[in-house]
Image (cartoon, rainbow, N blue to C red):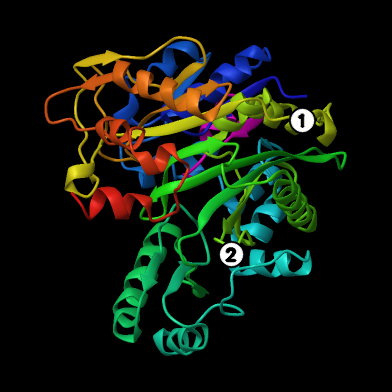
Amino acid sequence: MISRVLIANRGEIALRILRACQELDLDTVVVYSEADAGAIYRRFADASICIGPGPAASSYLDIPRIIAAAEVSDIDAIHPGYGFLAENPHFAEICENSKITFIGPPSKAIRAVGDKVNARALAREAGVPIVPGSDGLVEDENQAAEVAQALGYPVLLKAAAGGGGRGMRVAHNRPSLKTLFAQAREEARAAFKDGGLYVEKCLERPRHVEFQVLADTQGAMVHLFERDCSIQRRHQKLIEEAPSPALTPALRQRMGEAALRIARRAGYVNAGTVEFLLDRAGEFYFIEMNARLQVEHPVTEMATGVDIVQQQLRIAMGKPLGFTQEEVALRGWTMECRITAEDPAQNFRPAPGRIATFFAPGGPGVRFDSHVHAGYVIPPFYDSMIGKLIVHRDTREAAIQCMGKALRELVIEGENLRTTIPLYRDIFAHSKFVGGEVDTHFIDDYFLRAG
């Protein structure tokens, strides 16, 4: 059994995990960098340990420091949250070898799906369609150009290790591929210490739809239906909703079954997400599986009533899921906006600073997952996430109206501080979004190019 959990992350997800632990009567230990010394969740945890200076490489990404913190705090388990070490199989393996329960998939499963080339092979073996592309890694730009010539431009250069849009570039012709190949490889090396790239055909105006999966240690596995993540910029999600306006009941069933086949093939345990692209003809293609808790997990929690973080903890304790696929149902409509300290008018340039005025929205069906408060200084070292605004109502129309109201209520202001709140207000008033007529190019088409 688990009685004491170390939370190896920061920001809103550290607070989210802490709350789930406390509801299960588990003691908590949070780690923090010097830049996060004033973090509010330190006040609520049973203990907190400083693991180094602000830069992530010297704190949240430093495995020896985190393991040392775990040893001195006498914990049973580590929850990695998302980002940082959450999808690092070496870290999971060290936890396993140190007799510390890793609250996530086993290291073997992380390796199986963490390399995107290998994950594509798993999907193929499971009989799930994949986006046409190279059979494996491409060694250099010349080999990439040969694959691109066979597929037809545009093509997508993708890092084999990692996610979050890093190490990804769209090449529209041979000259651009040469420059972008070098950029993608360099970014992949910097982000994941692995410069391996592969090539995929760039589908024309697809939707991005992902399925949340849960699997226990007894072999039971369910999906919690889909999230539509088509509103993106630079391959990073901005808005998520459930259900997807594009899915019919029959297509939803096919995609859910495909997600489970891939997860079973990987020997998956705990929470994970299987991601697909959906083309205009209604055909779907596997692109990757994220072996961790997703940023947008609250969408599924509010859409299904399943507490995913608590399920992660229960699964790590060896407990069964306690429900079947037939007992999971989508209820109403849920939407989420990722609020970040960025300036959309300056191509989403990071714009952190001190929050002088803060007011969180409320009312029925409104949730704001955040760790910030008036006086909080957003550090420059990490992701620019401030919080996640989630609403749940009976219909999509009502959810859009509720989100519009919540965005008008949300106040996060400070000198030199810029946020994405004004952008979301415009999106939720846009006729194409209101009509559900979106794809992964929506932001480029209506906001970046026009602005």
Between the residue at mark 1 and the residue at mark 2, the CA separation in whole angstroms equals: 29 Å
Is residue 4 shown left or right of residue 428? right
Q: Is residue 82 visible?
A: yes
Residue projecting furthest to the right: 218
Residue type for callout 1: Val
Q: Which residue is mark 1?
A: 328
Q: Residue at x 50, y 10 (%)?
A: 364
Tell me if 103 is positioned left or right of 180 in this view. right
Q: Residue 423: x percent and y percent?
A: 27, 36
Label 1: state its secondary structure.
loop
Q: Quadrant of residue 218?
A: top right
Whole-percent x and y of residue 331? Answer: 66, 25
Q: Looking at the image, is mark 1 or mark 2 nearer the viewer?
A: 1
Return the residue nearer the eye: 393 or 63. 393
Q: Residue furthest left?
A: 415
Q: Which residues are magenta?
A: 68-84
Q: Earlier in the sequence, mark 1 or mark 2?
A: 2
Residue 407's place in the image compared with 138, above or below, is above
Residue drawn at point x = 49 percent, y = 27 percent: 397
Give the percent coordinates (x, y) of residue 352. Answer: 22, 34
Rate crowding at label 1 as few (under 14), some (14 to 19) or many (20 or more) other CA atoms within 10 Å: some
Can residue 85 be seen here? The reply is no
Q: Residue 348 placed where, x, y %?
A: 25, 46
Q: Is residue 216 above or below residue 111?
A: above
Tell me the kind of residue under disc 2.
Lys
**Which residue has dot 2 on it?**
116
Which residue is rendered at x = 12% and y = 25% of the image?
415
Q: Is residue 41 magenta?
A: no
Q: Is residue 425 left or right of residue 352?
A: right
